[in-house]
Structures are given as C-alpha cells and as structure tokens.
Amino acid sequence: MEALSVDYGYDRPPVSEQSRQEVARRAGVDPGYVDRLVELGILRPGAGGAFSQGDARRARWVHGLERSGVPLDRMAAAVRDGALSFSFLDASAFDRFAEVSGTTFHELSARTGIPMDLLKVVREATGFAEPQPQDRVREDELSVVQTIELQLSRGFRPVVIERWLRVCADSLHRIAETETDLWHTEVELPLLEGGMTEVEMLEAQADLGSQIAPLMEQTLLAIWHGQQEHAWSKNHVENVENALEKAGLFSRLHYPPAMCFVDITGYTRLTEERGDEAAADLAGRLATLVRRCSQEHGGQPVKWLGDGVMFYFPDPGQGVLAALDMVEGVAAEAIPPAHVGIHAGRVVFQEGDYFGRTVNIAARIAEYARPGEVLVSQEVVDAADGTPVSFTEIGPVELKGVSGTLRLHTARRRN
C-alpha cells in the first residue's frame, strides 16, 4: 500500500498517535461521533488525547453495530459493567482489516478513468453494499484498483474484469463463511464451555487469531498458487498442441467435453430426518469422495447443488470412470445411493459456471437414472471409445424438458 499512498496522496500518521480527526476518517464517521464514544467510555484516548489504530477499528465496528440496530447507550452500559469489551480489536489479527481512505468513489473514478459501475463492483466484491459516488473508498479496495488499472491499460474488457471480480467474491465469501463457522465451533465455544466469560473469550480468541491468521493466509495462498499452476499448465498444454497441430507436427482426436450430475437418492428427506449436524457430516464425506474421484480422472466440480454435484470433464470417457468410482464409493461410505447422468457436447463457460443444452440434458439424464446407476447419452458412448467400460442401451427415452428422444445407455466396468 506504500505506492498507493504516494500515487493518490494518502498520508498515514503513526498508528499509535492518531488524532481525533484521523480516527474519524479511518473509521468513516464524523469527528463528533468519536467525541461521543469517548464520552461513553467506549474509546479511551491516551496521553495528549492520542488514539490508537485499535480505536479506529472500535469506532467503525461500534458504528456498524449501531446502524444494524444495536443501541449505542446499551453497548456503553455493557462496557462500563464489564459485560462487553472491544479491547480485543487491538490484536494484530485485525490489522488486516482495511480502514477508510480520504477519497471518494467519484474522485477515484475521475483520477483513474475507471468507470463508476466497475468501481462499484469492487465494493460489492468485498462483501459490502453498493456504494454511492460520494462514499469514501476503503484502503483494501485501492489495491484492487491498481490491478484494474493495469488490466484496462492492456485492453481487458470491463465486462470480463467484472466477471472475474464476482467469481473471486463468490469463492472467497464461501471460504470466509466456512472459516468463521470453524472458528466459532472449534475456538469460541470450547472457551466458553471451559468457563470463560464472553469478555475473556473475546480476548483469548483474539490472541490465538493473531497467531493463526498469518498461517491461514499462507495456506490460502499456497492452495491458490497450486490451483494456478494446474490451470496455467492446462492452458499451456493446449497452446503447445495448437502450435504443433498448425505446423502439421501433431494430430489429436477432438471429442466434446462432458457434463456430469451426481445426485444422492433421498438426500433431502434424510437430512430433514437426521438434522443439521448429520446433514453437514454427510455433505462433508460426499464432498471429499466426489472431489477426489473427479480429480483423479481429470475433471472438476463446478458447483454443489441441493442434493448433488455438477462436474465438468474434458474427456467423456474419464467422466464415466469417475462416475462409476463415485457410485461405488458412495455405497462403501454408507451414504444413500447415488445416481448419475452424463452428456457430451458444446458448453458455454461464464463466471465460473457452465451453461447450455449439454448441461440441461445431463441434469435430465441424472433425474431419470435409477439409484446406483450411471446413465449416459449416445454422445458419451461415441466419445468413450477405448475406455474400459461396457454400455448397455436402454432404448430411446423421452426426458422432461428435452425435445425428441435420446438413446441412453447404462455404464458398467468391463469384466
């Protein structure tokens, strides 16, 4: 962020000696609000009236709580009585959370030339509501703006940048929500059950958070870099094959990709009968199983549905083998039987998802399949030539929402 401070003119005072005005700016509140928090005892400036970086966070968090409907005077009373404390916000784990800068979205758009609509997506990507032109930009959003500036300067289309931002936001939102739930069940609840008060728990969990947060960030980056290597290697292989093919030095068979839907029979009824904890356990075991099976055969999970998963396979034959592994694995795990539908054909990729007729037909085939059955279209059979699988045609079938009839086949391992 040092470069941003120079480029956009943002000066940063020492975090241990922030003025009343600076705390208000970083918290996104009026200076009068800071005075009010001091009067109530929520903020306690040091010698000479100096505030800390934690004070700026306290002002912003308390303001957010008040806006969400929590009475300010009630919070102050709880702090005075010792029933509530915001001192945990001094922990270094919270240093990663951005403060508000001194520039507005309107000013930033004018300075950079980035369209206002695209800047609004940056705010939405961080999980907050759409900003108004006069709202001030968060400091973490400025680092995103640097990336967008470079992308636009190299000819990236705004619509593509927006799609990328939304996919990042969706994926990271799921990570953050799962991480928060893990923290609550594995850290906060055990501390409370061990006899700590709410205030003591908040202090203790903040100390642990300061230790583990950098390691979790390191883990997240390591996984992301590994995924990049996988995706970039795949793209590089395709580029090399294309170059060799154009030079007449290489030829390859061209098969359409396959979409695969794996559904669990009676999943919804089972989770309703056994409760949320059993549902979470079932979902976790299923996720581990199907992810491993798909990756072993070159596929990837696209999205998790209410009672199953949607997959993409570049090679339809490998998709069939993966589906058979999944059905067998589900049975071995004592999970209700799975039924699978696979269809091969052209697909449209957009915002991390796949669309088109091929996807719709695969979903309908999965609905038609019986428990424990892997059912595929004729297009999959044609593309799976050489795969150690036997196919048995069940005849032309009419599927709901699909015009005409389809030749469907059950797939089994070849003896």
Image (spheres, rainbow, N blue to C red):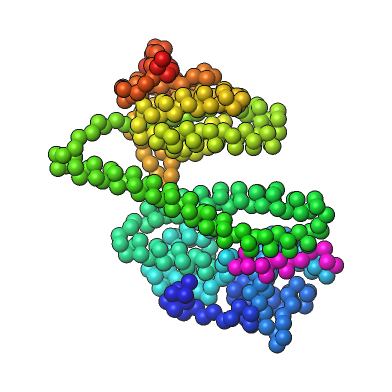
Comparing 76 with 400, the one in front is 76
Q: Is residue 285 left or right of residue 376?
A: right
Q: Report x, y in % for residue 326.
A: 50, 27
Q: Report x, y in % for residue 151.
A: 35, 61
Instruction: Identify whether 269 is placed above or below 96.
Output: above
At 57% from the left and 24% from the top, the residue drawn is 332
Q: Which quarter of the figure has residue 162? A: bottom left
At 51% from the left and 80% from the top, the residue drawn is 11
Q: Which quarter of the figure has residue 378? A: top left
Comparing 105 with 153, the one in front is 153
Q: Is residue 166 visible?
A: no
Instruction: Identify whether 158 is placed above or below 45.
Output: above
At 75% from the left and 72% from the top, the residue drawn is 42
Q: What is the quadrant of the C terminus in the image?
A: top left
Q: Is residue 149 left or right of residue 136?
A: left
Instruction: Identify whether 344 is placed above or below 407.
Output: below
Does the stretch in magenta take in 88? yes
What is the residue that sits farthest to the left in this orientation?
Answer: 248
Q: Is residue 398 left or right of residue 245?
A: right
At 66% from the left and 31% from the top, the residue drawn is 271
Magenta stretch: dominant secondary structure: helix
What is the residue that sits farthest to the right in this orientation?
Answer: 81
Q: Report x, y in % for residue 164.
A: 42, 53
Stretch of the chain drawn in magenta: 81-95
Q: Is residue 390 visible?
A: yes
Q: Report x, y in % for residue 119.
A: 45, 62
Instruction: Identify whether 155 is placed above or below 309.
Output: below
